Each structure stands twice: as structure tokens, then as C-alpha cells.
Amino acid sequence: MDLQLTDKVFIVTGGSKGIGEGITRSLHAEGASVMIATRSEGAVTEHLLKELRGEGGNVHVIYGDLDTSEQCKHVVAKTVEHFGRIDGLVNNAGVNDGAGLVSGPEAFRRSIRVNLFHYYDLVHYALPWLKKSKGSVVNVSSKVALTGQGGTSGYAAAKGAQLALTREWAAELLPHSIRVNAVLPAEVMTPLYRKWLDSTFENPMEKEREISAKIPLEKRMTTKSEMAAMVVFLLSGKSSHTTGQFLFVDGGYVHLDRSLT
Ligand code: NAP
């Protein structure tokens, strides 16, 4: 299927690691241009840029913490300066930071700030450009928004709010034909997930096997490229009548009967 993304321009937050890296790679494979907005400068991002540019890709990066609205404004301005247009935005950067009920109000507020506010800020600043292109927004949320996890109030609240905003923005932006959808991962092996396993459990490998065994479809985690395939479809015109939707790319983890595992 030709997704007709050649020469289209997308911002992917956290686009050089984990699920974001998968999205950047898939967009690149479809001939799209990508502006990665991510925090840490380093070898992982530089290596990805070198690799994709070596294949003729138009992929750039803006470093900086998205937890200020100034940085979000800067990301949009630089994208337009560099590429001249924006066809879509993938709000993906986030961290399950374990700000639970015992962590206290400051940790809770910080968690909401780092997981939620930049989702709004980027759509706000990109809006004039998305109106021009009739663009598409994809919010990467989490199963935690609906299932809970325990010990992570801030992250859960932010992920739930991302779903509410997906519906709200889909409604508000109907007159502009801008589509807004959410994708909900459950278990995807990424640097964030690895860190959580390694820092939380005495025997992370055993825990990983235990979790995988509970995923109904093929008893395995979802891959980054499986996540990316859904996101890229939602960014493309092939999903032109899909908006306000929550897409679960999780091997049936959230919805299928527990007795199946
Ligand atoms: P990851 O491996 O940690 O990658 C996330 C990327 O986002 C990193 O490059 C990180 O930069 C960047 N980032 C995070 N916060 C940022 C900020 N404030 N400003 C700029 N960049 C920032 O995470 P992932 O597992 O791929 O997760 C991606 C998304 O999927 C998140 O929204 C997460 O909540 C969601 N999700 C993941 C899973 C899963 O199983 N992996 C499950 C449910 C939901 P640094 O390198 O500087 O940290």
C-alpha cells in the first residue's frame, strides 16, 4: 500500500529511542521527512540520524526538554523554518516516573508536567500549520490510562488526559479536517521499559517472561515497528475517515478474556 507520505513533514517527540525510533524509521521508509524533538543529546540519536541520512532520508533533530512551552514553540518554529510545512505531529515523549500516592503533591505535579503539558503545547503551536495541511495528530497514550498500574498516579492521570484530549481535539478540529487519534501501547520493549524492569524487580528476566506469557496473541511483546505501523497509518491519508479513536496495539492484552492466558 502506498501511504503517499513522500515529501510530507512530521514532528515525532522522543523520536530517536523506543517507540518513537520505530515511528521515525517507518516514516523514513515511506519517504517522509521527520523532525525529531528529544531531550538527551548523544550517540543513539546521532547514530540514527547518520544511518537514515545515509539512506537519503530527510531527518533532523531538535534537542531540549519539552517540559517548557518555550521549547515546544521552538520545535514548531524550527520545523517550519527547516521544512516549510507540518503535515502531522506524533506526541510520544513520556516517562512512567512512578509518582504514586506516597510520592506527594510536588512529584505528582511534576509528572503531569513532563507527561501531559507538551502534548497540548505542541498541538497549540503547530495548529496554523496543521490547518494548512489538514494534518493528523497521534497521541501515544498507555494502557495504564484504563487499567491502572499502581504507584504511578501522575503518569496514569496524564495518560488518561491524553485520551480525553484526543476526543476533545478531534471534535474541535472537525471543521479543519484535522484528525486526532490515540494509540495505546501495553508492553513494548524499549529503553524506558527495560529501565523499569531492571530497576523494579529482583529478577527482571523472569518478570519479562511472566509478562510476555500473559499477552494473548503469540505470548510476546508488541514490537516497535508494530506500534509504528499503526501510527504511520493514522498519519496517512489512508485513514482519512478515522478520528477521535483509541487504537490498542497490544496483542489483545487489555480486552481479551483472561482465561485465554
Ligand atoms: P523511551 O524508550 O524512554 O523513549 C522515549 C523518548 O522520549 C526518549 O528518547 C526520551 O528522551 C524522550 N523524552 C521523554 N521525555 C521527554 C521530554 N520531556 N522532552 C524531550 N524528550 C523526552 O520510551 P518508550 O517506551 O518508547 O515510550 C514512548 C511512549 O510510549 C511514552 O509516551 C510512553 O508512556 C508510552 N508507552 C510505552 C509503553 C511501553 O511498553 N514501552 C507502554 C505504554 C505506553 P531521553 O532519552 O532523554 O530520556
Image (cartoon, helix red, strand yellow):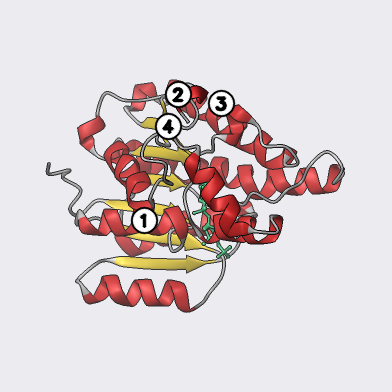
Residue type of the residue flagged with mark 3: Ala
Residue in the picture at 62% in, 56% down: 197
The kind of residue tagged 2 is Leu
Residue 90: where, in percent of width, then height?
A: 42, 46
Q: CA distance from mark 3 to mark 2?
A: 23 Å
* Foreground residue among 255 and 64: 255
Q: Are marks 4 and 3 in contact (CB under 8 Å)?
A: no
Q: Is disc 4 placed on a helix, strand or loop? A: strand
Mark 3 neighbour class, 10 Å CA radius: few under 14, some 14 to 19, many 20 or more: some
Give the mark toward the camera: 4 or 2. Answer: 2
**Secondary structure found at label 2:** loop
Q: Earlier in the sequence, mark 1 or mark 3?
A: 1
What's the residue at 63%, 46% (across, down)? 115
Label 2 CB less than 8 angstroms from ligand 1: no
Residue 250: x and y in percent read: 43, 37
Q: Amino acid at mark 1?
A: Gly
The answer, for residue 235, to whether it is visible in the render is yes
Residue at image mark 4? 248
Q: Residue furthest left?
A: 1
- Element on which disc 3 rests: helix
Q: Residue at x 52, y 38 (%)?
A: 141
Q: Is mark 3 within 8 Å of ligand 1?
A: no
Return the residue at label 1.
22
Q: Earlier in the sequence, mark 3 or mark 2?
A: 3
Please say if the residues under marks 4 and 2 sit with CB atoms less than 8 Å apart: no
The residue that label 2 is drawn on is 256
Q: Earlier in the sequence, mark 1 or mark 2?
A: 1
Identify the residue under disc 3.
Answer: 164
The quadrant holding residue 246 is top left
Foreground: disc 1 or disc 2: 2
**Amino acid type of the residue that numbered disc 4 sits on in the rendered structure:** Phe
